[in-house]
Amino acid sequence: MLSAQSLSCIRGERPLFEGVGFDVGAGDLVHVRGANGSGKTSLLRMLAGLALPAAGDVLWNGVSIASEPAAYHRELLYLGHLPAIKDDLSGTENLQLASELDGDSLGEDAARAALLRIGLAGREDLPARVLSAGQKRRVLLARLLTRRARLWVLDEPFTALDVKAVDMLGALVTEHLAQGGSAVVTSHQPLPMADARVVQL
Ligand SMILES: Nc1ncnc2c1ncn2[C@@H]1O[C@H](COP(=O)(O)OP(=O)(O)OP(=O)(O)O)[C@@H](O)[C@H]1O
Protein backbone atom coordinates (compact mmCIF):
# COMPACT_ATOMS: atom_id res chain seq x y z
CA MET A 1 0.00 0.00 0.00
CA LEU A 2 1.26 3.44 -0.96
CA SER A 3 0.41 6.31 1.32
CA ALA A 4 0.99 9.94 0.40
CA GLN A 5 0.81 11.94 3.60
CA SER A 6 0.28 15.71 3.65
CA LEU A 7 2.67 16.32 0.78
CA SER A 8 3.76 19.86 -0.02
CA CYS A 9 5.77 21.03 -3.00
CA ILE A 10 7.60 24.30 -3.47
CA ARG A 11 9.16 25.16 -6.83
CA GLY A 12 11.44 28.18 -6.80
CA GLU A 13 9.70 30.54 -4.39
CA ARG A 14 6.25 29.28 -5.27
CA PRO A 15 4.21 26.75 -3.28
CA LEU A 16 2.63 24.46 -5.87
CA PHE A 17 0.49 22.34 -3.57
CA GLU A 18 0.26 21.45 0.07
CA GLY A 19 -1.47 18.93 2.28
CA VAL A 20 -1.97 16.41 -0.51
CA GLY A 21 -2.75 12.99 0.92
CA PHE A 22 -4.18 9.75 -0.40
CA ASP A 23 -3.76 5.99 -0.11
CA VAL A 24 -3.37 3.54 -2.97
CA GLY A 25 -4.06 -0.06 -2.03
CA ALA A 26 -4.16 -3.32 -3.98
CA GLY A 27 -6.45 -2.94 -7.00
CA ASP A 28 -6.65 0.85 -6.63
CA LEU A 29 -6.28 3.37 -9.43
CA VAL A 30 -5.61 7.05 -8.67
CA HIS A 31 -5.96 9.66 -11.40
CA VAL A 32 -3.96 12.83 -10.66
CA ARG A 33 -5.49 15.80 -12.46
CA GLY A 34 -4.68 19.48 -12.66
CA ALA A 35 -3.87 22.33 -15.02
CA ASN A 36 -0.51 22.65 -16.79
CA GLY A 37 2.08 23.57 -14.18
CA SER A 38 -0.08 22.56 -11.21
CA GLY A 39 2.55 20.04 -10.08
CA LYS A 40 1.38 16.64 -11.33
CA THR A 41 4.83 15.59 -12.54
CA SER A 42 6.37 16.99 -9.36
CA LEU A 43 3.95 14.90 -7.28
CA LEU A 44 4.67 11.73 -9.26
CA ARG A 45 8.42 12.27 -8.90
CA MET A 46 7.90 12.45 -5.14
CA LEU A 47 5.90 9.22 -5.22
CA ALA A 48 8.72 7.61 -7.18
CA GLY A 49 11.33 8.79 -4.70
CA LEU A 50 13.02 11.03 -7.27
CA ALA A 51 12.20 14.29 -5.46
CA LEU A 52 11.74 15.13 -1.82
CA PRO A 53 8.56 16.80 -0.56
CA ALA A 54 8.92 20.16 1.19
CA ALA A 55 6.69 18.64 3.87
CA GLY A 56 4.97 15.31 4.38
CA ASP A 57 6.11 11.82 3.55
CA VAL A 58 5.50 8.91 1.19
CA LEU A 59 5.08 5.51 2.83
CA TRP A 60 5.15 2.07 1.25
CA ASN A 61 3.57 -0.56 3.48
CA GLY A 62 3.92 1.81 6.41
CA VAL A 63 7.63 2.56 5.91
CA SER A 64 8.98 5.84 4.53
CA ILE A 65 10.29 5.23 1.00
CA ALA A 66 13.32 7.38 1.89
CA SER A 67 14.38 4.91 4.58
CA GLU A 68 14.19 1.77 2.41
CA PRO A 69 14.57 2.95 -1.19
CA ALA A 70 15.91 -0.31 -2.62
CA ALA A 71 13.00 -2.39 -1.33
CA TYR A 72 10.55 0.20 -2.64
CA HIS A 73 12.12 0.41 -6.07
CA ARG A 74 11.79 -3.32 -6.57
CA GLU A 75 8.02 -2.88 -6.25
CA LEU A 76 7.77 0.27 -8.38
CA LEU A 77 7.60 0.94 -12.09
CA TYR A 78 7.78 4.65 -12.83
CA LEU A 79 7.38 5.85 -16.40
CA GLY A 80 8.01 9.56 -16.89
CA HIS A 81 6.15 11.61 -19.45
CA LEU A 82 9.09 12.12 -21.80
CA PRO A 83 10.10 8.98 -23.63
CA ALA A 84 13.06 7.86 -21.53
CA ILE A 85 14.48 5.74 -24.30
CA LYS A 86 17.84 5.87 -26.04
CA ASP A 87 17.52 7.04 -29.64
CA ASP A 88 20.46 5.00 -30.92
CA LEU A 89 19.16 1.72 -29.55
CA SER A 90 16.39 -0.41 -31.01
CA GLY A 91 13.19 -1.13 -29.11
CA THR A 92 14.52 -4.56 -28.17
CA GLU A 93 17.80 -3.11 -26.94
CA ASN A 94 16.02 -0.36 -25.02
CA LEU A 95 13.92 -2.90 -23.14
CA GLN A 96 16.96 -5.02 -22.38
CA LEU A 97 18.91 -1.98 -21.16
CA ALA A 98 16.05 -0.83 -18.92
CA SER A 99 15.89 -4.30 -17.45
CA GLU A 100 19.64 -4.34 -16.79
CA LEU A 101 19.41 -0.97 -15.05
CA ASP A 102 16.76 -2.53 -12.82
CA GLY A 103 19.23 -5.29 -11.96
CA ASP A 104 17.29 -7.89 -13.97
CA SER A 105 18.03 -9.68 -17.18
CA LEU A 106 15.57 -9.69 -20.07
CA GLY A 107 16.12 -12.14 -22.91
CA GLU A 108 15.88 -10.94 -26.49
CA ASP A 109 12.89 -13.19 -27.17
CA ALA A 110 10.97 -11.78 -24.22
CA ALA A 111 11.76 -8.23 -25.33
CA ARG A 112 10.56 -8.98 -28.86
CA ALA A 113 7.38 -10.62 -27.57
CA ALA A 114 6.58 -7.51 -25.51
CA LEU A 115 7.11 -5.23 -28.50
CA LEU A 116 4.92 -7.48 -30.61
CA ARG A 117 2.13 -7.36 -28.04
CA ILE A 118 2.40 -3.57 -27.76
CA GLY A 119 1.91 -3.27 -31.52
CA LEU A 120 5.44 -2.80 -32.80
CA ALA A 121 5.75 -5.89 -34.98
CA GLY A 122 8.36 -5.27 -37.66
CA ARG A 123 9.78 -2.27 -35.79
CA GLU A 124 11.73 -4.16 -33.13
CA ASP A 125 15.16 -3.61 -34.66
CA LEU A 126 14.86 -0.02 -35.84
CA PRO A 127 16.76 2.60 -33.89
CA ALA A 128 14.28 4.46 -31.71
CA ARG A 129 15.23 7.73 -33.40
CA VAL A 130 13.32 6.73 -36.55
CA LEU A 131 10.16 5.73 -34.68
CA SER A 132 7.15 8.03 -34.54
CA ALA A 133 6.23 9.74 -31.26
CA GLY A 134 3.50 7.19 -30.57
CA GLN A 135 5.78 4.27 -31.44
CA LYS A 136 8.46 5.59 -29.06
CA ARG A 137 5.86 5.79 -26.36
CA ARG A 138 4.85 2.21 -27.10
CA VAL A 139 8.47 1.12 -26.56
CA LEU A 140 8.38 2.81 -23.17
CA LEU A 141 5.02 1.23 -22.34
CA ALA A 142 6.32 -2.21 -23.26
CA ARG A 143 8.12 -2.07 -19.91
CA LEU A 144 4.73 -2.63 -18.31
CA LEU A 145 4.92 -6.10 -19.85
CA THR A 146 8.58 -6.87 -19.18
CA ARG A 147 8.93 -5.76 -15.58
CA ARG A 148 6.87 -7.08 -12.72
CA ALA A 149 6.03 -4.32 -10.27
CA ARG A 150 3.12 -3.98 -7.88
CA LEU A 151 2.92 -0.21 -8.16
CA TRP A 152 2.76 1.61 -11.49
CA VAL A 153 3.37 5.37 -11.45
CA LEU A 154 2.66 6.64 -14.96
CA ASP A 155 3.07 10.26 -16.04
CA GLU A 156 0.82 11.12 -19.00
CA PRO A 157 1.00 7.58 -20.41
CA PHE A 158 -1.71 8.29 -23.00
CA THR A 159 0.16 11.14 -24.69
CA ALA A 160 0.75 10.55 -28.41
CA LEU A 161 -1.13 7.24 -28.45
CA ASP A 162 -3.68 6.43 -31.12
CA VAL A 163 -7.15 5.14 -30.23
CA LYS A 164 -6.12 1.49 -30.40
CA ALA A 165 -3.10 2.04 -28.18
CA VAL A 166 -5.20 3.98 -25.65
CA ASP A 167 -7.55 0.99 -25.42
CA MET A 168 -4.62 -1.41 -25.13
CA LEU A 169 -3.02 0.59 -22.32
CA GLY A 170 -6.38 0.84 -20.57
CA ALA A 171 -6.70 -2.95 -20.77
CA LEU A 172 -3.16 -3.44 -19.41
CA VAL A 173 -3.86 -1.21 -16.42
CA THR A 174 -7.20 -2.94 -15.79
CA GLU A 175 -5.47 -6.34 -15.87
CA HIS A 176 -2.75 -5.08 -13.49
CA LEU A 177 -5.40 -3.86 -11.02
CA ALA A 178 -7.34 -7.12 -11.28
CA GLN A 179 -4.17 -8.96 -10.29
CA GLY A 180 -3.89 -6.86 -7.13
CA GLY A 181 -1.57 -4.20 -8.52
CA SER A 182 -1.95 -0.46 -7.95
CA ALA A 183 -1.54 2.52 -10.25
CA VAL A 184 -1.18 6.28 -10.05
CA VAL A 185 -1.69 7.98 -13.41
CA THR A 186 -1.70 11.57 -14.64
CA SER A 187 -3.82 12.45 -17.62
CA HIS A 188 -5.53 15.56 -18.91
CA GLN A 189 -8.22 13.37 -20.46
CA PRO A 190 -10.70 11.16 -18.60
CA LEU A 191 -9.17 7.70 -18.16
CA PRO A 192 -10.54 4.84 -20.27
CA MET A 193 -10.44 2.60 -17.18
CA ALA A 194 -13.38 2.47 -14.77
CA ASP A 195 -13.36 3.43 -11.10
CA ALA A 196 -10.39 5.77 -10.87
CA ARG A 197 -10.17 7.92 -7.73
CA VAL A 198 -9.37 11.51 -8.70
CA VAL A 199 -6.76 13.58 -6.87
CA GLN A 200 -7.12 17.16 -8.07
CA LEU A 201 -4.15 19.54 -7.78
N1 LIG B 1 13.48 22.46 -10.82
C1 LIG B 1 12.53 23.41 -10.92
N2 LIG B 1 12.79 24.69 -10.56
C2 LIG B 1 11.84 25.65 -10.64
N3 LIG B 1 10.60 25.40 -11.06
C3 LIG B 1 10.30 24.14 -11.44
C4 LIG B 1 11.24 23.09 -11.38
N4 LIG B 1 10.65 21.95 -11.82
C5 LIG B 1 9.37 22.29 -12.12
N5 LIG B 1 9.17 23.60 -11.90
C6 LIG B 1 7.92 24.33 -12.10
O1 LIG B 1 6.93 23.73 -11.29
C7 LIG B 1 5.67 23.82 -11.92
C8 LIG B 1 5.02 22.44 -11.93
O2 LIG B 1 5.68 21.61 -12.86
P1 LIG B 1 5.14 20.14 -13.16
O3 LIG B 1 5.96 19.61 -14.28
O4 LIG B 1 5.09 19.37 -11.90
O5 LIG B 1 3.63 20.46 -13.64
P2 LIG B 1 2.54 19.54 -14.32
O6 LIG B 1 1.27 19.69 -13.52
O7 LIG B 1 3.04 18.16 -14.50
O8 LIG B 1 2.35 20.26 -15.72
P3 LIG B 1 1.91 19.72 -17.20
O9 LIG B 1 0.43 19.47 -17.15
O10 LIG B 1 2.24 20.91 -18.06
O11 LIG B 1 2.73 18.52 -17.51
C9 LIG B 1 5.91 24.43 -13.29
O12 LIG B 1 5.56 25.80 -13.25
C10 LIG B 1 7.39 24.23 -13.50
O13 LIG B 1 7.93 25.23 -14.32
Image (spheres, grey):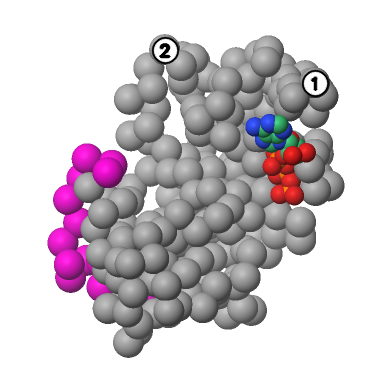
Instruction: Give the residues in magenta.
Output: 101-118
Q: Quadrant of residue 6?
A: top right
Circle 1 residue:
13
Q: Residue 122: x, y in percent?
A: 32, 87
Ligand 1 - quadrant of the structure image: top right
The answer to whether residue 5 is above or below residue 40 is: above
Q: Are marks 1 and 2 in contact (CB under 8 Å)?
A: no
At horizontal 39% and vertical 27% (from top left) the residue drawn is: 72
The answer to whether residue 126 is above or below residue 45 is: below
Per the rendering, the mark at residue 25 is: none
Q: Amino acid at mark 2?
A: Ser
Q: Residue 45: x, y in percent?
A: 57, 34
Nearer-the-camera pick, 125 or 72: 125
Nearer-the-camera pick, 171 or 162: 162
Residue 68 on the magenta span: no
**Residue 11 appears left or right of 114:** right
The residue tagged with tag 2: helix, strand or loop?
Answer: loop
**Residue 72 appears left or right of 134:** left
Q: Amino acid at mark 1?
A: Glu
Circle 2 residue:
67
Q: Residue 133: x, y in percent?
A: 55, 73
Nearer-the-camera pick, 133 or 154: 133
At horizontal 82% and vertical 24% (from top left) the residue drawn is: 14
Query: What main secondary structure does the magenta stretch of the protein show?
Result: helix
At horizontal 67% and vertical 15% (from top left) the residue drawn is: 54
Tell which residue pokes out farthest to the bottom in this image: 122
The answer to whether residue 180 is above or below residue 87 is: above
Q: Residue 58: x, y in percent?
A: 56, 21
Mark 1 Cα shell of 10 Å, populated few (<14), some (14-19), many (≥20): few
Of callouts 1 and 2, the N-terminal one: 1
**Residue 48 appears left or right of 74:** right
